[in-house]
Image (tube, helix red, strand yellow):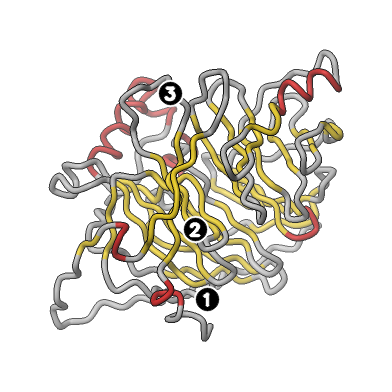
Amino acid sequence: MIKRIILIGLVLFSTSCVAEQKREITGLDHLFTKEAEITLETEEYLSVRFVEVNERGDFLVTGRRDNVFLFKGSGEKIRDLGENARKAHPGLNWSPNRAIFLPEGSIFVQNNAPWGIYFDEKGHYNRAAPSGFNVSNRFTAGAGNIFYSMDITPQGGFIRKLNANGDEIGRFEEIPDSFINLMQRYRVGNQFVADDQYLFFTMAAEPALFRLDFQEGELNRYEQPPEYVKRAGGDISSLQQVGPSGLAEEISNFTDNYTVSYSLHRFTDQLLLIQYQNRRDVVDGKPGFGIQLVTKHGKFPMETDLLTDEWVVAAANGKIYTMTQQDDANAPPKLNVYRLKDLFMDKYEDE
């Protein structure tokens, strides 16, 4: 029997009866210093879906056409993981959804049948996961290569804790379900981060950071939304109610009118980064991506609301990596590298 874990909510945000002064909206240069532009060198077309960065600064890129590439921090390609896997395992069904760095430096690719493939830190094929291994599109791995996977069903959501072979070793069943239909159908950027103590995650329609402590059985919610955030009042319909075309229209209307918690990134050992996305008309024509920093203990140290037209694809080692739309869609992707200014870093070092 899997023990049911009790949900303990903690909201570190209160609304004052006294009207507060409107927060200033700033850009990236308010908190960050641009360090470099990096071109990802590849001979073939690469449309970026996910980017991971390890401690050495190497890039692991999952593309939209079954591409998974490992690049040096300079942008030089190290290896095409799909090409390497097919050579090492003839007949392998290579159909990747997302690749991540595991904590000790090796690589895991979430695939379709087999469901998981392991590579060493240089991108060489190692082995396929057992046939019973399965994680959802919302997953990450923490210390000891323990995987966390959020499964969303019409009846509710839950988080499974799995070992490297896919054996379930724990489950948390009290996931907020206010937007369960949207969560089941709408997939955005990375929303899971784990360390040796906690699992952090975001939900697409809620401007909050959730922190799950599997050992203590507590789920904390930390919330202090930027002023530009526009909340949805309710969930979209279920697929059974409106059908595929109606559901697609509802999702489109949702993203046109409300703020989405697009992705979550580990920025430093103490800081996480939440990225929001708005349509420009939602924020009066201002840039559509918003950045909010939060400590792993639920403090929000930013004094302004930051909006930008640059998409944060990764964050690590005190840096963020962004992309902007290029004039030539077939040109190699370029990453902009920014470092958080030291004056800001000093504000949370006492954590």
Secondary structure of residue under mark 1:
loop
Task: Answer with mark 3 or mark 1, whichever residue precedes in sequence.
Answer: 1
Which residue in the structure is indicated by mark 1?
297
Q: Nearer the viewer, residue 241 or 313?
A: 313
Q: Position of residue 14 (x, y in %)?
A: 31, 78
Which residue lies at the image location 24% right of the left edge and 53% below the top edge? 230
Q: Amino acid at mark 1?
A: His
Task: Answer with mark 1 or mark 2, whichever residue precedes in sequence.
Answer: 1
Which residue lies at the image location 42% right of the left edge and 46% below the top edge? 336
Which residue lies at the image location 39% right of the left edge and 68% below the top edge? 223
Q: Are marks 3 and 1 in contact (CB under 8 Å)?
A: no
Nearest-to-viewer mark from 1 and 2: 2
Q: Amino acid at mark 3?
A: Ala
Q: Amino acid at mark 2?
A: Lys
Which residue in the structure is indicated by mark 3?
331
Task: Decide if residue 150 is on the left or right side of residue 14.
Answer: right
Secondary structure of residue under mark 3:
loop
- Label 2 to label 3, Cα distance in Å? 24 Å
Which residue lies at the image location 79% right of the left edge and 37% below the top edge? 119
Task: Answer with mark 2 or mark 3, whichever residue precedes in sequence.
Answer: 2
Q: Nearer the viewer, residue 179 or 268?
A: 268
- Label 3 to label 1, Cα distance in Å? 41 Å
Q: Quadrant of the rendered structure where residue 107 is?
A: top right
Which residue in the structure is indicated by mark 2?
319
Nearest-to-viewer mark from 3 and 1: 3
